Amino acid sequence: MKKKYKIILWVVLILAVGGYLAMQLFTPLKVTVEAAAYGPLTDSFTVQGNVEPQKSFIVNSTATGTVLTLPFKAGMTVQEGQELIRIAPANPADLEIQKQQLRQQLATAEYQYQQLFSAEGLARQAAAVSAAQGAYDLAQQQYQAALQVEHEMSGVYTAAQLSELENAVKAAQEGLTAAQAQSGTAASRNYYHTLISSTSAQLAALDEEEQNEPLLAPFTGVVWQLLTDEGSYIIKNQPVLKLYQSGPMKIEASLLSEDTWNLHVDDEASLRLSDGSTCDATVSFISPVAEQVISSLGLMENRCTVELTPVDLPQSLGAGHQVDVSFTRLLAENALSVSASAIVPINEDSAVYVVQGGKAQLTKVQPGLKSGGRVEITAGLNAGDMVITNPYDAGVKDGSRVSWTE
């Protein structure tokens, strides 16, 4: 009796397993499919950009002295003609010492110029050159005469005497060269003209410093950066702050040089602000010059500067803010493509599963460009072919029965 029950149990078990296997064999796999279709193939990437003013200006100090007050802070608006900074002039005693030194330098330069280039000075220089030329000619004649005598009657002059005559020629030549160098040449005139002009300009600058003209805003704008602090000692023409004109801003971004190859002026981009909001922008400038920079990973990169004109940028977003700039490039205007997840590697080839007659048919294809999760198919597929996009998740094999949703 027990043996009978065991046989029945085994039969039931075999039938259950067989039924399950049959169900697995004949039940189609649920897959997702898409129709291969022609369309544009694009590539998107995002970089960080900086908000910059369209027009900015560096304001330089009009005097040398100590910064007493800086009434404005970065981000504040100033009106044209407002005083930007108050400077305590340098110590008058120190200025007077500098002016005395410059006056002495100027007087010396003018005296030397007069000595060299007045009528009397030029005459003295000409006489000195003539005397040096005569001395050189005489020494040369004496030396050549001794050489001639020695050539005709050897032994008249000793070696020491000939050496002395030769040294006299060299000394006379050096004297002639020095006299010519001190004469009124164009180079010498230019040197003294430059020296006198430079010294006079420095004296005039010190005179202006004593007046301590106020530093006024050249236009109505926004203070961008302060380049000095209260109590600092600054000199005339030293940069003290940066201003920019209120109005439209621009976005400046640094792109890898290869990312600019398919980018053009007037191309559109999307901006994401720090609060998550977005706005559009248009490429207005692409620098043709690439600059080598070190990336955050320590690698050398070639980067180009790209400027964009934003649309409806919030007025509260001033210079120095950062935004994410997303670009979309057109890689192919009309490409037959499928989802990248549909590609199945076969040895060194690629394939996809195409649905034919309710079954998955493994089909070799030739992939092309890849971007944005899609792959261009240059051979092996036709437009309209139904391609399985999740072959791995669904466990699809060649010949598998499938049911699908698009």
Image (spheres, helix red, strand yellow):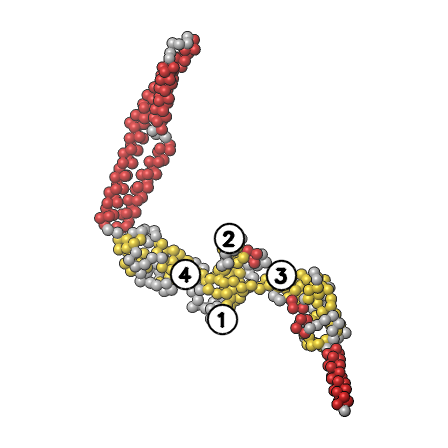
Name the amino acid, label 3: Leu
Earlier sequence position, callout 2 versus callout 1: 1
For the point 72% across and 75% down, the residue is: 402
Residue placed farthest to the left in the image? 93
Task: Judge depth for marks 2 and 4 and give the one in front.
Answer: 2
Q: Secondary structure at mark 2?
A: strand
**Residue closest to the eye, 289 or 359:** 359
Residue designated by label 2: 292
Query: Residue 122 location in percent, x, y?
Result: 32, 27
Q: Rounded to the nearest whole Å, what is the CA distance between mark 2 and mark 3?
A: 26 Å
User: Looking at the image, is 60 positioned above or below residue 329?
Assistant: above
Residue 103 placement, left or right of 21: left
- Cβ atoms at labels 2 and 4 below 8 Å apart: no
Query: Does residue 40 appear in this view?
Result: no
Dot 3 alpha-carbon crowd within 10 angstroms: few under 14, some 14 to 19, many 20 or more: some
Name the amino acid, label 4: Gln
Task: Judge depth for marks 1 and 4 and give the one in front.
Answer: 1
Q: Rounded to the nearest whole Å, what is the CA distance between mark 1 and mark 4?
A: 25 Å
Q: Secondary structure at mark 3?
A: strand
Name the amino acid, label 2: Gln
**Residue closest to the eye, 18 or 236:** 18
Residue placed farthest to the bottom in the image? 1
Earlier sequence position, callout 1 versus callout 4: 4
Q: Rounded to the nearest whole Å, what is the CA distance between mark 3 and mark 4?
A: 39 Å
Residue designated by label 3: 331
Residue designated by label 1: 277
